[in-house]
């Protein structure tokens, strides 16, 4: 089962079809079948024409396309090869298709040659730019160390097409043509329906059954996802609702996303289309993030960069959806991007043929996507390599919440059917971080030091004493962010933030230098300045302690616990934006919130006082006129949004300065 049955949103770029004379061997019936994507029927006729010795660009284009869009890349490369040998002016897209088809037979050197021809004709295309930037793509992909991934053909595959997996409680939901019924003209195989398979006692999935007669119709259904509470389903279907088929002006029945709710009888009901469906374009392959706040999907709607792009829309608390937003040129290419999936870490996986790969569609990942896109950070698109990818089409990546097991679909050689579902298991990825604790100025090794490991939010995970050589060591998980902090009596604590590599068994070296404790712990000193603490940030208009602020407050907490006779005054300041009365109240709330944090972590309340100055003590000339500052940028304004931690008394000495 090939491309149409997995609904890849490959909207065929029909070339202009010339009027043929009576001698033209391609008859009107064949032309109509080609326009209607009935490629199996068309191919038989076109082959007979070619066998008689007829040659023309149109004939070879149609034969190549008939195989290419059914993912028979080996045959497609044969006819595209004949097309380019005619040495006539053709759409450069055929050089790209020929290159991609050659990769299916692992003819990479020849494939790169024709990709260069594509680049000569379309140098501004993102696919050209990416290829030129990654000419060594094949070596990089082959060097990816995935020996920790075990891939196997799922036991519930059929001799037909099975692909795309979503998890519903203890069952898997997937698309398949195994049910018979109405046959699609594209490849003369049955339309897709949704099925479920249950996990058996042997930990294998078994007992395949139809998913829901409320969801399945006489046309295609595939590509499902569920809301976090698993009470709402989103799925792909042809534009078919209430027994009516809707087509556009060209007679094309587009793909659309529908949703349904689970009722008290455990039945799916109220099947409705999402509001941004259209007769004029397709949308498909929905995927919802862990929080249930975003839905990702593919579409060729107006504004798309390629044959299909990745989009996102907000999911509101009442279940309604926001308007679609294209994920942009940093992700989408002039090729095809499909089957988005966002795991619990916020990594975005998707299938694409627009980036250099092993052939057909490959699965790519942008690690930390949701965090990076929200913070406008640089993103990197990575090929997952083998065995997830192959020279054929690999798509519909899905992993469980732990990320240790998942599924990918592929039409690679050796499968049971056209498209098969493959199960993969990933050994837990671990790295080692180790280093020495040294004295900052002399570089001598410090013994009797303690090293703490924190997660990215500042939660303590482990602590160890350095060994006789002043060395510490921790085992950490791959691709996670950590903080490692060195502490020794008589020295100022120091820490390093790092992200563990995504490769297995790496060793990260982080030596930590400590300077002797020479802090002037005297009355009126500001601990924030002494400890080198930057601005304690709060979210706009809020006074909750943020994760990044908590890490800094932990340093103050250590000092408070070491100096139990210290009295501290927490002072909060704002910039001049907003009314003076509002800023005063906001700063007081922030100071009190900071105090509450220390009290909750074991500091006596009578050792802490608070005061909110609002905008009374600006550090610079960023004053406001009409409640707006016209002479300062955002960075300068933020310098006033600070917290101070003033030592009011220590060791019996009192601060006299107000």
Image: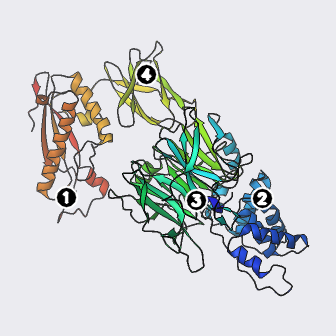
Tag shown at residue 86: none
Of callouts 3 and 1, the N-terminal one: 3
Residue at point 18% right, 36% down? Answer: 596
Give the answer, above or below, for where 6 lies relative to 399: below
Q: Give the residue at mark 2.
A: 113
- Residue 144 seen by the camera: no
Callout in the foreground (3, 1)? 3
Residue at point 14% right, 55% down? Answer: 582
| Whole-number angstrom distance, CA of label 1 to CA of label 2 | 63 Å
Residue at point 76% right, 61% down? Answer: 114
Of callouts 4 and 1, the N-terminal one: 4
- Label 4: state its secondary structure: strand
| Whole-number angstrom distance, CA of label 3 to CA of label 1 | 49 Å
| Whole-number angstrom distance, CA of label 3 to CA of label 4 | 48 Å
Residue 56 placement: quadrant: bottom right
Q: Give the residue at mark 4.
A: 437
Callout in the foreground (3, 4)? 3
Please state the horizontal and vertical placement of residue 52, each as a whole percent of the image.
91, 73
| Whole-number angstrom distance, CA of label 2 to CA of label 3 | 24 Å
- Label 3: state its secondary structure: strand
Q: Give the residue at mark 1.
A: 623
| Whole-number angstrom distance, CA of label 4 to CA of label 1 | 46 Å
| Whole-number angstrom distance, CA of label 2 to CA of label 4 | 54 Å
- Label 1: state its secondary structure: loop
Q: Give the residue at mark 3.
A: 337
Q: Are marks 3 and 1 in contact (CB under 8 Å)?
A: no
Please state the horizontal and vertical placement of residue 151, each as a whole percent of the image.
64, 39
Q: Are marks 4 and 1 in contact (CB under 8 Å)?
A: no
């Amino acid at each position: 089962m090939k491309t149409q049955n997995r609904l890849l949103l490959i909207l065929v770029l029909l070339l202009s079809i010339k009027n043929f004379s009576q001698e033209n061997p391609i008859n009107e019936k064949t032309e109509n079948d080609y326009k209607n994507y009935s490629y199996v029927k068309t191919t038989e006729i076109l082959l007979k024409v070619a066998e008689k010795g007829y040659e023309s660009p149109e004939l070879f284009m149609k034969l190549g396309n008939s195989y290419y869009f059914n993912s028979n890349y080996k045959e497609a490369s044969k006819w595209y090869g004949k097309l380019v040998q005619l040495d006539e002016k053709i759409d450069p897209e055929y050089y790209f298709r020929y290159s991609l088809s050659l990769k299916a037979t692992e003819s990479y050197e020849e494939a790169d040659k024709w990709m260069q021809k594509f680049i000569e004709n379309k140098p501004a295309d993102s696919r050209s730019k990416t290829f030129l930037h990654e000419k060594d793509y094949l070596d990089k992909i082959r060097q990816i160390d995935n020996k920790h991934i075990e891939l196997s053909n799922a036991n519930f595959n059929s001799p037909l097409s099975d692909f795309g997996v979503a998890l519903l409680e203890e069952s898997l939901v997937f698309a398949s043509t195994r049910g018979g019924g109405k046959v699609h003209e594209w490849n003369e195989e049955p339309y897709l329906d949704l099925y479920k398979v249950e996990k058996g006692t042997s930990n294998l999935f078994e007992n395949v059954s139809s998913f829901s007669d409320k969801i399945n119709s006489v046309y295609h259904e595939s590509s499902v996802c569920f809301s976090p509470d698993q009470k709402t389903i989103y799925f792909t279907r042809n534009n078919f609702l209430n027994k009516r088929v809707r087509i556009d002006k060209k007679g094309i029945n587009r793909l659309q996303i529908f949703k349904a709710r689970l009722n008290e009888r455990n039945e799916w009901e109220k099947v409705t289309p999402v509001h941004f469906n259209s007769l004029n374009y397709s949308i498909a392959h929905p995927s919802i993030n862990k929080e249930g706040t975003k839905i990702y999907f593919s579409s060729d709607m107006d504004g798309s960069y390629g044959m299909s792009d990745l989009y996102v829309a907000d999911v509101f608390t009442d279940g309604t959806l926001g308007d679609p937003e294209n994920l942009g040129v940093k992700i989408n290419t002039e090729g095809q991007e499909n089957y988005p999936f966002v795991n619990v870490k916020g990594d975005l996986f998707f299938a694409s043929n627009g980036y250099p790969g092993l052939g057909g569609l490959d699965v790519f990942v942008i690690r930390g996507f949701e965090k990076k896109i929200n913070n406008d950070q640089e993103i990197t698109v990575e090929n997952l390599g083998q065995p997830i990818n192959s020279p054929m089409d690999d798509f519909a990546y899905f992993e469980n919440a732990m990320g240790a097991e998942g599924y990918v679909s592929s039409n690679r050689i050796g499968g049971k059917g056209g498209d098969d579902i493959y199960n993969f298991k990933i050994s837990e990825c671990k790295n080692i971080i180790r280093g020495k604790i040294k004295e900052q100025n002399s570089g001598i090794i410090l013994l009797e030091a303690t090293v703490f490991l924190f997660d990215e939010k500042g939660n303590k995970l482990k602590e160890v004493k350095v060994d006789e050589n002043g060395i510490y060591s921790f085992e950490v998980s791959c691709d996670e962010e950590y903080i490692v902090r060195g502490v020794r009596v008589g020295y100022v604590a120091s820490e390093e933030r790092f992200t563990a590599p995504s490769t297995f068994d790496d060793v990260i070296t982080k030596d930590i230098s400590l300077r002797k404790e020479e802090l002037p712990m005297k009355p009126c000193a500001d601990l924030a300045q002494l400890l080198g603490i930057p601005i304690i940030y709060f979210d706009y208009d809020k006074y909750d302690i943020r994760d990044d602020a908590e890490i800094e407050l932990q340093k103050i907490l250590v000092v408070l616990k070491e100096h139990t006779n210290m009295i501290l005054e927490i002072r909060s300041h704002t910039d001049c934006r907003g009314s003076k009365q509002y800023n005063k109240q906001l700063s007081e709330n922030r100071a009190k919130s900071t105090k509450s944090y220390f009290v909750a972590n074991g500091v006596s309340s009578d050792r802490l006082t608070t005061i909110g100055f609002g905008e009374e003590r600006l550090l610079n000339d960023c004053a406001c006129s009409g409640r707006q500052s016209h002479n300062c940028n955002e960075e300068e304004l933020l310098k006033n949004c600070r917290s101070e931690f003033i030592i009011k008394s220590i060791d019996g000495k009192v601060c006299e300065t107000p």
